[in-house]
Image (tube, grey):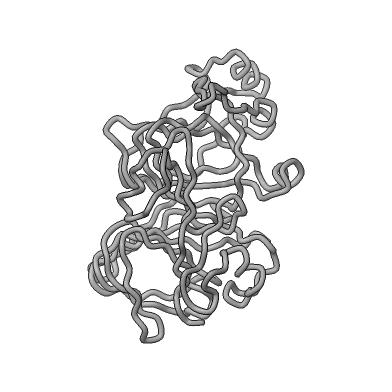
């Protein structure tokens, strides 16, 4: 099939969520919606294919049953997950395991992720990293609840890109919306949740032992080499790729007018964050608008974009 696979997202209610995802044209469920699982093969939030011969299948079903659309992969789990997160309130302070720890203890992939900041209110900041020099010091500070001295606060603004390897203590804070590209994992270890309670008055579970086990000590900041390329009136940005990120490469396409692109991986994940236009594949054009998410399968060798659009795209790494 030489056409894009357009997807229907899955929406997750969260204690820290809001209603800002409505700006993408989504018909949200009631309540506080924190996450749009836009391109997802994960069983906790499967996205569904809307068009073509695979219509009605989830991404995970298509990946397992129709491997020719994904370059005939040898692994059985669709490796990536694209989300949009609306932090109406601050998320818990957390850390994710690497593949080895997650496979042993959780029986799923580890979780390295990254964020493109769609919007951030003035004065916004992230929790990103920590100040402990040894694992013993980390354990002591966590058990003492000495968050002011342990946690590192990093200012963040609209348009920033943040790479969050497994083992990095982190949290999105109030007033930030991001597009997240991550390994397909739902394993989160919470260190601290501000002593919040749900509607029934219950605090959410913490995972202190696991957090201490998997946190990178001392903290290590990844060294990114972000590159910008002008193509006509459009701008292509490479945020991260191998070897810094073995799991995925992430790009931004700021489309102004016509832009011709060719594939660099077995398939490409595409999310339209703003604007509208068209994507043309093998002479057939499809409309694109803010809030659309799609996969360009293996059979799509090249494509033409036309319009004014802000797009985040990603491709799988070569980890297997």
Q: Which residue is drawn at 51% across and 34% down?
A: 170
Q: Nearer the viewer, residue 121 or 290?
A: 290
Q: Nearer the viewer, residue 12 or 221?
A: 12
- Residue 144 in view, yes or no: yes
Extreme residue in the right direction: 104
**Residue drawn at 37 percent across, 53 percent down:** 27
Left or right? Give the position of 213 relative to 59.
right
Residue 167 percent location from the top left of the image: 60, 37
Total label count? 0
- Residue at 32 percent across and 72 percent down: it is 287
Picture layout, residue 193 above or below residue 45: above
Residue 103 in the image: state x and y as whole percent.
73, 47
Query: Residue 97 is drawn in which quadrant?
Result: top right
Q: In this view, does 244 lie above or below 57?
A: above
Q: Where is residue 78 in the image (x, y as percent from the top left)?
A: 61, 61
In the image, is 80 to the left or to the right of 302? right
Location of residue 127 in the rendering, given as x and y in whole percent from the top left corner: 46, 30
Of residues 22 and 279, which is closer to you in this image? 22
Residue furthest out toward the bottom: 283
Vertical placement of 73 versus 148: above or below? Answer: below
- Residue 242, can we see it? no
**Who's the residue at 33% across and 54% down the image?**
24
In the image: residue 79, left or right of residue 100:
left
State the quadrant of the C terminus: bottom right
Nearest the camera: 244 or 193?
193
């Amino acid at each position: 099939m030489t056409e894009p696979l357009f997807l229907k997202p899955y929406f997750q209610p969260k204690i820290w969520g809001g209603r800002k995802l409505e700006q993408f044209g989504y018909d949200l469920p009631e309540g506080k919606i924190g996450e749009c699982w836009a391109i997802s093969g994960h069983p906790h939030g499967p996205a569904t294919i809307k068009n073509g011969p695979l219509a009605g299948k989830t991404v995970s079903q298509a990946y397992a049953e129709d491997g020719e659309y994904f370059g005939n992969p040898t692994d059985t789990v669709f490796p990536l997950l694209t989300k949009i997160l609306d932090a109406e309130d601050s998320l818990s302070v957390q850390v994710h395991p690497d593949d080895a720890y997650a496979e042993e203890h959780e029986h799923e992939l580890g979780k390295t992720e990254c964020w493109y900041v769609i919007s951030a209110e003035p004065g916004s900041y992230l929790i990103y990293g920590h100040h402990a020099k040894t694992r013993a010091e980390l354990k002591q500070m966590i058990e003492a609840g000495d968050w002011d001295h342990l946690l590192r606060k990093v200012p963040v603004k609209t348009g920033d890109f943040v790479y969050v390897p497994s083992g990095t203590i982190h949290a999105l804070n109030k007033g930030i919306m991001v597009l997240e590209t991550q390994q397909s994992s739902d394993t989160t270890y919470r260190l601290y949740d501000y002593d919040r309670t749900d509607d029934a008055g219950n605090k959410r579970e913490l995972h202190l032992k696991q957090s201490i086990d998997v946190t990178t000590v001392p903290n290590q900041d990844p060294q990114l080499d972000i590159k910008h390329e002008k193509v006509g009136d459009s701008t292509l940005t490479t945020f991260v790729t191998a070897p810094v990120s073995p799991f995925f490469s992430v790009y931004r396409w700021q489309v102004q007018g016509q832009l011709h692109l060719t594939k660099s991986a077995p398939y490409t994940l595409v999310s339209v964050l703003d604007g509208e236009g068209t994507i043309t594949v093998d002479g057939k054009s499809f409309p694109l608008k803010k809030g659309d998410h799609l996969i360009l399968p293996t059979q799509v060798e090249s494509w033409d974009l036309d319009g004014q659009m802000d797009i985040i795209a990603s491709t799988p790494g070569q980890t297997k």
